[in-house]
Amino acid sequence: MTHLWLSLGIIFSLGILIPGKFSLKLQYDRDQVLHIVPETFQQVQHLQLLCSTFMLDLWKPLLPEDIRAGEDLHIRVPASLVQEVKDSLDQHMISYRVLIPDVQKLVDQSMPRERRSHRQVSGGYVYTEYHPMEEIYQWMTQIQKNNSELVTQHILGKTFENRTMYYLQVREEIYLNMLCIFSFQILQNYKTDPKISRFLQNLDLYVLPVLNIDGYIYSWEEDRLWRKSRSPFENGTCYGTDLNRNFNSSWGSVGVSFNCSSDVFCGSGPESEPETRAVAQFIQSKKSDVLCYLTIHSYGQLILTPYGFTTKPPSNNEELMQVAKEAAAALTGKYGTSYRVGSTALILYSNSGSSRDWAHTIGIPLSYTFELRDTGTHGFVLPANQIQPTCEETMLAVTTIIDYVDKKYFPNGHVVLTSSSLGLSLCLSIVLTWLVS
């Protein structure tokens, strides 16, 4: 029996779409997201200075030093600075357009009209909405109770704030029930799609709905755009680490910040955070069996291969690219959504300490990052009505990759490896949260 490691969605709490009516302490009324494509090096320099001086929130890329001529720049500008920033852009003859005229309005539109109080999820979990932590745990409990012969619950570890991180171990065909969290229609596919039925016969599934529990809850209660964990630094003057820059893969070498106030702060050292260590230890314990590792973030419509910390391709780059292109083609076939494919350092930006690169460096041959919808129209605040189509098309890409692994290692349905696993970490952005790549 092989195993499938599936982290459904929340490694870091980044740009979460918050359901229900909440009185968050931090609001983004009349904040705007601007789209700029600098044309000259001088414009790049001015934009870098502007972002640093006003401490603007970079959505794409994530660091001022990654702003480049001819490439898209998306920045969130607080309402109090909008006119000043626009005047500065005009003065330097830098063209711009408003992507999002009111960030808070878009957030409000993405939320259900009212929060359900103590709603039980049995028979009523809505997979086209966003859910608070308590409903996600209700879902886990209900799934385990309804399928006690197939599903068991386990503890992965503890967060910094001492919250327990649970995962479910799921055997064989119940796998599709787990994927209901982002597309209930997958259940039907199990009965009708022989490809899915075939490769599920040899797999176990590990489901980790929420890893960064502290940051996730904080983003619901305090700050809708909170991106990091919640561990304190410098005597509590700043909080949180970008966990996807905290893995031990060329940690701290490029595309990070050592300023604990930065959204891309990489922590005090590799695997310095309990959440990162929990994942790393779990995967390390099974690394000889793991064949594939996926992380799913937003946004940009990209399938990224290793590495982020160097432009030197991995030894199996040809295979990585071939499988990624097939996955992108399958995804596009559903609704026509176009995805680019390539290494992170070449088609996005350089970064280090990512789980994708870490997984490949410890010997997992196929390791990818998905950057889901869209390309900036809504950015990290994707409307809830795009949850289902995003998940449906993404599942076609994911099953394409799994099908490749299944055919390569289990031809004709026979197990080739004496002990093997399909390790699949699906850190679903859009559906549940946003992950910095």
Image (cartoon, rainbow, N blue to C red):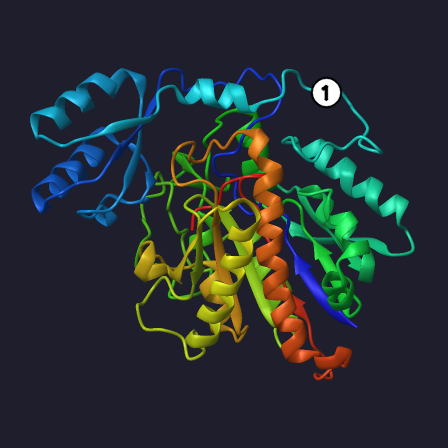
Q: Nearer the viewer, residue 235 or 155?
A: 155
Q: Residue 263 occupies which quadrant of the picture?
A: top left
Q: Position of residue 152 (x, y in %)?
A: 83, 54
Residue 345's spot in the image, x, y percent? 32, 61
User: How many residues crowd mark 1 within 10 Å: few (<14), some (14–19), many (20+)?
Assistant: few
Q: Residue at x 70, y 83 (%)?
A: 417
Left or right: where 182 falls relative to 333: right
Q: Is residue 218 visible?
A: yes
Tell me which residue sits at (39%, 41%) in the image. 375
Q: Position of residue 60 (x, y in %)?
A: 33, 42
Q: Position of residue 204 (x, y in %)?
A: 76, 64
Q: In the visual, does 2 lie left or right of 265?
A: right
Location of residue 411 by image quarter = bottom right
The reply to whether residue 359 is visible in this rendering is no
The residue pinned by badge 1 equals 116
Furthest residue in direction right, as rendered = 149
Q: Is residue 271 above or below residue 60?
A: below
Nearer the observer, 314 or 250: 314
Q: In what quadrant of the picture does the N terminus appear?
A: bottom right
Front residue (pair 95, 275)? 95
* Residue at x 44%, y 49% (from the top left corner): 338
Horizontal arrangement in the rendering, residue 260 relative to residue 49 (left or right): right
Q: Residue at x 17, y 31 (%)?
A: 95
Task: Assign a secondary structure to mark 1.
Answer: loop
| Residue type (three-letter) at the residue carrying disc 1 | Arg
